[in-house]
Protein backbone atom coordinates (compact mmCIF):
# COMPACT_ATOMS: atom_id res chain seq x y z
CA UNK A 1 0.00 0.00 0.00
CA UNK A 2 2.86 2.44 0.69
CA UNK A 3 1.42 4.02 3.82
CA UNK A 4 2.64 7.49 4.83
CA UNK A 5 1.18 7.43 8.32
CA UNK A 6 -1.09 5.54 10.65
CA UNK A 7 -3.11 7.80 12.96
CA UNK A 8 -4.91 6.52 16.05
CA UNK A 9 -7.14 8.22 18.54
CA UNK A 10 -10.66 9.27 19.34
CA UNK A 11 -12.72 11.29 16.88
CA UNK A 12 -14.69 14.06 18.61
CA UNK A 13 -16.97 16.36 16.61
CA UNK A 14 -15.44 15.06 13.36
CA UNK A 15 -11.86 15.84 14.43
CA UNK A 16 -8.90 13.74 15.53
CA UNK A 17 -6.18 15.10 17.83
CA UNK A 18 -2.80 14.71 16.10
CA UNK A 19 0.43 16.20 17.50
CA UNK A 20 -1.34 19.13 19.13
CA UNK A 21 -3.70 19.87 16.23
CA UNK A 22 -7.30 18.83 15.61
CA UNK A 23 -7.63 17.59 12.04
CA UNK A 24 -10.87 16.92 10.19
CA UNK A 25 -11.47 13.22 9.51
CA UNK A 26 -14.25 11.22 7.84
CA UNK A 27 -16.73 9.04 9.68
CA UNK A 28 -18.41 8.84 13.04
CA UNK A 29 -17.07 9.98 16.39
CA UNK A 30 -15.37 7.40 18.60
CA UNK A 31 -12.15 5.37 18.61
CA UNK A 32 -10.53 5.34 15.18
CA UNK A 33 -7.50 4.40 13.15
CA UNK A 34 -6.65 6.09 9.84
CA UNK A 35 -4.02 5.62 7.14
CA UNK A 36 -2.86 7.96 4.39
CA UNK A 37 -0.52 7.44 1.44
CA UNK A 38 2.64 9.61 1.16
CA UNK A 39 1.58 11.21 -2.13
CA UNK A 40 -1.63 12.50 -0.49
CA UNK A 41 0.15 14.31 2.34
CA UNK A 42 0.53 17.99 1.42
CA UNK A 43 2.72 20.78 2.74
CA UNK A 44 0.60 23.82 3.54
CA UNK A 45 1.98 26.77 5.48
CA UNK A 46 -1.54 27.55 6.79
CA UNK A 47 -2.28 24.02 8.08
CA UNK A 48 -2.73 23.73 11.86
CA UNK A 49 -0.71 20.48 11.98
CA UNK A 50 2.95 21.48 12.38
CA UNK A 51 5.69 18.83 12.04
CA UNK A 52 9.49 18.94 11.98
CA UNK A 53 11.38 17.79 8.90
CA UNK A 54 13.57 14.92 10.14
CA UNK A 55 14.70 13.77 6.70
CA UNK A 56 14.53 15.24 3.20
CA UNK A 57 15.97 13.50 0.17
CA UNK A 58 15.43 13.28 -3.53
CA UNK A 59 13.88 10.01 -4.68
CA UNK A 60 13.91 10.24 -8.45
CA UNK A 61 10.68 11.91 -9.56
CA UNK A 62 9.88 13.45 -6.16
CA UNK A 63 11.30 14.29 -2.77
CA UNK A 64 10.76 12.02 0.22
CA UNK A 65 10.20 13.72 3.55
CA UNK A 66 10.05 12.23 7.01
CA UNK A 67 8.00 14.57 9.19
CA UNK A 68 7.84 14.08 12.95
CA UNK A 69 5.87 15.44 15.87
CA UNK A 70 4.76 14.31 19.31
CA UNK A 71 3.64 10.71 18.85
CA UNK A 72 3.62 10.76 15.04
CA UNK A 73 5.82 10.14 12.01
CA UNK A 74 4.54 10.98 8.54
CA UNK A 75 6.20 10.13 5.23
CA UNK A 76 5.33 12.62 2.50
CA UNK A 77 6.21 12.93 -1.16
CA UNK A 78 6.99 16.45 -2.35
CA UNK A 79 7.14 17.63 -5.95
CA UNK A 80 10.00 19.68 -7.32
CA UNK A 81 13.64 20.16 -6.53
CA UNK A 82 13.27 22.55 -3.58
CA UNK A 83 12.74 20.49 -0.43
CA UNK A 84 12.39 22.01 3.04
CA UNK A 85 15.54 21.95 5.15
CA UNK A 86 15.98 19.26 7.79
CA UNK A 87 15.10 20.70 11.18
CA UNK A 88 12.53 23.20 9.93
CA UNK A 89 8.89 23.06 10.96
CA UNK A 90 6.30 22.84 8.19
CA UNK A 91 2.52 22.90 7.98
CA UNK A 92 1.06 19.54 6.97
CA UNK A 93 -2.33 18.93 5.42
CA UNK A 94 -3.92 15.47 5.63
CA UNK A 95 -6.94 15.82 3.32
CA UNK A 96 -9.97 14.12 4.88
CA UNK A 97 -10.99 12.64 1.52
CA UNK A 98 -7.61 10.89 1.36
CA UNK A 99 -7.70 9.40 4.87
CA UNK A 100 -8.63 5.73 4.88
CA UNK A 101 -10.54 4.79 8.02
CA UNK A 102 -9.62 1.28 9.08
CA UNK A 103 -12.68 -0.63 10.30
CA UNK A 104 -12.87 -0.87 14.09
CA UNK A 105 -11.54 -4.18 15.33
CA UNK A 106 -9.76 -5.03 12.08
CA UNK A 107 -6.43 -5.90 13.70
CA UNK A 108 -5.21 -7.66 10.53
CA UNK A 109 -5.67 -4.49 8.47
CA UNK A 110 -3.83 -2.39 11.06
CA UNK A 111 -0.91 -4.85 11.15
CA UNK A 112 -0.73 -4.96 7.36
CA UNK A 113 -0.62 -1.18 7.14
CA UNK A 114 1.99 -0.84 9.88
CA UNK A 115 4.27 -3.27 8.02
CA UNK A 116 4.20 -1.03 4.94
CA UNK A 117 4.52 2.27 6.86
Image: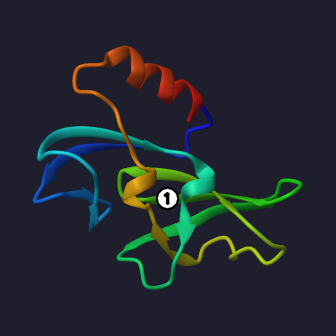
Tell me if 4 is positioned left or right of 108 in this view. right
Q: In the rendered image of this protein, does residue 47 appear above or below residue 108?
A: below
Q: Which residue is mark 1?
A: 68
Q: In the rendered image of this protein, does residue 60 appear above or below residue 31?
A: below
Tell me if 90 is positioned left or right of 80 in this view. left
- The count of marks equals 1
Q: Secondary structure under badge 1?
A: strand
**Outermost top residue:** 108
Find residue 115 and report its horizontal and vertical position in percent: 55, 24
Find residue 98 and report its horizontal and vertical position in percent: 46, 52
Q: In the rendered image of this protein, does residue 95 appear above or below residue 100?
A: below
Q: Quadrant of residue 40?
A: bottom right
Which quadrant of the figure contains the N terminus?
Answer: top right
User: Which of the two residues, 62 or 51, is positioned nearer the viewer here?
Assistant: 62
Find residue 89 and report its horizontal and vertical position in percent: 52, 77
Find residue 24 and report its horizontal and vertical position in percent: 27, 62
Crowd tier of the residue under label 1, counting other residues whose Cα lies within 10 Å: few below 14, some 14–19, many 20 or above: some
Amino acid sequence: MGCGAVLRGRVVDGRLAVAGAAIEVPGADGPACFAIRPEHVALDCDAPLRLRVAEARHAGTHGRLLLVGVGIEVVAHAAGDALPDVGTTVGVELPPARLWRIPAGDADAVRAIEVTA
